[in-house]
Image (cartoon, rainbow, N blue to C red):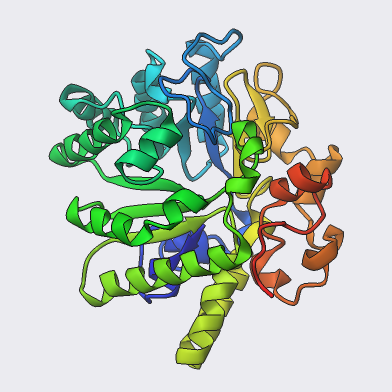
Amino acid sequence: MIDITKLFCGQETESDALRYGEGHGAAKAASERRPVVVWNTTRTCNLRCIHCYTASENKKYEGELTNSQGRALIEDLAQFKIPAILFSGGEPLVRPDLLELATYAKSLGLRPTLSTNGNLIDEKMAARIKAAGFIYVGVSLDGLEEVNDKFRGAVGAFKKALGAFRNLHAVGQKVGLRLTLTRHNAQELNRIFDFIEREGINRVCFYHLVYSGRGRGMRNEDLTHEESRQALDTILARSKDFSDRGLPIEVLTVDNHVDGIYLYLKLLKEDPDRAERVLKLLQWNGGGRFSSGVGIGDIDPEGNVHPDQFWMHYSFGNVKERKFSEIWQDTSDPLMAGLKARLPLLKGKCGACKWQSACGGSLRVRADLVYNDPWMEDPACYLD
């Protein structure tokens, strides 16, 4: 994640300790961080999004972790002292025991977060989510009404997600917007920022597209490098406007660490002293160097462990057979070993890049999906 509000706008945010080594509880080095764990609790989903990385549908899938297996997993994650667990899907709220599992995670000292399409969050569900102890809920939208409903495969999905934001706000639940950038919604970014302000949404994450699951067929829908730069220009300008007006809205971009270098280069022209401080924060964070396989991991509905949620075509093992904490620290797997010490392995543009210490080769799974080589350059790098 690139914290635009922190780096470009100079405002402190809640996750400074985790991302940039500042504040209470900060690790001495990014490489020492335990992973934020995404648990895809079910593959079943009530929508059929055209870019879904799990290719989920509204049907029952066999072999998913049971309640007792899920509780054992949560106990291991708590003992491993991970910083947060993200309950995801499919659509996690279709799982009957989801809120029970989140409450259990909270009782063991974990920080539970939720990723949802929001379409099941009526007033009653919003209150139950708040009571379960989620520290944050991310509701996915992929544009305003017409664009979102096309992406989500259901007319009315936008209105239900909007209702989710309002219902969660009403019970005092911290909630944010998650959006995957494509050619369709990038054209309405300014309108999306207007929507964020109008609805009082205080956190937004802009994801760069990853070509996994049904997203494999969407590469032609991805932004060109020039369009990526234009999108970042808009995101930076509107974030700065929010900051200048004192609006408490946190803006982040996800799955392309090049964004950090891009904003640093813009700052370098405007405020060289602050730009150098930003570069040091980016270097501490390490970008992709300490992401997949280090600072983030994934467990799919059947219990398979992956470097991140987009890398489901490769598994390090299964939590039904071995604890996640053991699997995660086992570097006998060549991919796990490589991800934990990736810089010497990088090839192409990433291998020769002078920004390695701050970008870290960005997202390795995108290189693997495009070139069948996890060490090749990230095809979404838009720097000249």
Relative to 317, residue 80 above or below = below
In the rendering, at what x and y percent does residue 212 appear?
Answer: 65, 37
Which residue is more in the foreground, 77 or 371?
A: 371
Tell which residue pokes out farthest to the left in this image: 170
Q: Residue at x 39, y 20 (%)?
A: 98
Residue 57 can be seen in this image = yes
Q: Residue at x 49, y 25 (%)?
A: 90
Residue 26 can be seen in this image = no
In the rendering, at what x and y percent does residue 115 appear?
Answer: 41, 35
In the rendering, at what x and y percent does residue 361 appear?
Answer: 72, 61
Relative to 226, residue 181 above or below = above
Q: Which residue is drawn at 37% across and 34% down?
A: 149
Which quarter of the figure has residue 355? bottom right
Relative to 258, residue 166 above or below = above
Q: In this view, does 332 lie to the left or right of 122?
A: right
In the rendering, at what x and y percent does residue 367 appear?
Answer: 75, 50
